[in-house]
Every structure is written in structure tokens, then in C-alpha cells.
Amino acid sequence: APQARQVLHRALDAAFGRVLIGADLDRFLDRAPQYTPLRDRLALFFAGSDAAFFGLGESAPQDLPALARDLAAIERGRR
């Protein structure tokens, strides 16, 4: 799961044009509003990353493959 989390982070970084952290989520969604329906799941993803990588807070279970599929579907629909 840590590798899946890292891959998803790199994809989000690419979409943002630089490293995307949870504190930048609102700015990312302002630039890419098509992802706004996933706001809560993205916030959960970043909170989980803070827990997994930095020991900050607690990580709630999350279906990362489903999140990746939903993000990809939005990306495909945009092209």
C-alpha cells in the first residue's frame, strides 16, 4: 500500500504541476475543479499520507485503487 500511495501522490503532483500536499488541496481544486466531487476522499488520502509517512494523526482505511480509478476517469473525461 505505501507504494500505491506514492504512485498516487506522483500522479497528483503531475496534475498540480508541483508537489501537492494536503494544505494545497483547495488551491488544487480551484485550478482543477473537475476533481471537486472527490474533495472528501482526497482530504482523507492526504491525512492518511501524513499518518503513514510522517506519523501525524491516524490513518482511516481507504480504497486507494478505487480512488485512483475515479481520478483517472475524471482525467480521461477531461481530454
Image (spheres, rainbow, N blue to C red):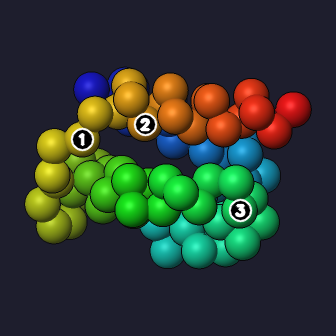
Camera-nearest residue between 3 and 59 = 59
Sequence order check, earlier mark of 3 and 1: 3
For label 1, count other residues whose C-alpha is less than 10 Å away and answer few (under 14), some (14-19) or many (20+). Answer: few
From the image, tell me which residue sits under label 3: 33
**Distance of label 2 from label 3 (alpha carbons):** 16 Å
Amino acid type, mark 1 = Gln
Image-based side of 50 in relation to 39, left or right:
left
Asked if the residue under mark 3 is in contact with the one under mark 2, i.e. CB atoms within 8 Å, the reply is: no
Q: Is residue 10 visible?
A: no
| As drawn, 8 above or below 42 | above
* Discs 2, 1 touching: Cβ within 8 Å: yes
- Judging by the rendered image, the residue that carries numbered circle 1 is 62
Q: Is residue 73 visible?
A: yes
**Amino acid type, mark 3:** Pro
Q: Which residue is located at x 55 percent, y 68 percent?
A: 25
Residue under label 2: 67
Give the vertical position of 59 relative to 57 (above or below).
above
Instruction: Indicate the secondary structure of the residue bearing disc 2.
Output: helix
Q: Residue 76 at what x, y percent from top left?
A: 74, 28
Q: What element carries label 3?
A: helix
Q: How far apart are marks 3 and 1 (CA)?
A: 22 Å
Q: Choose mark 3 or mark 1, whichever is in front.
A: 3
Q: What residue type is labelled 2?
A: Leu
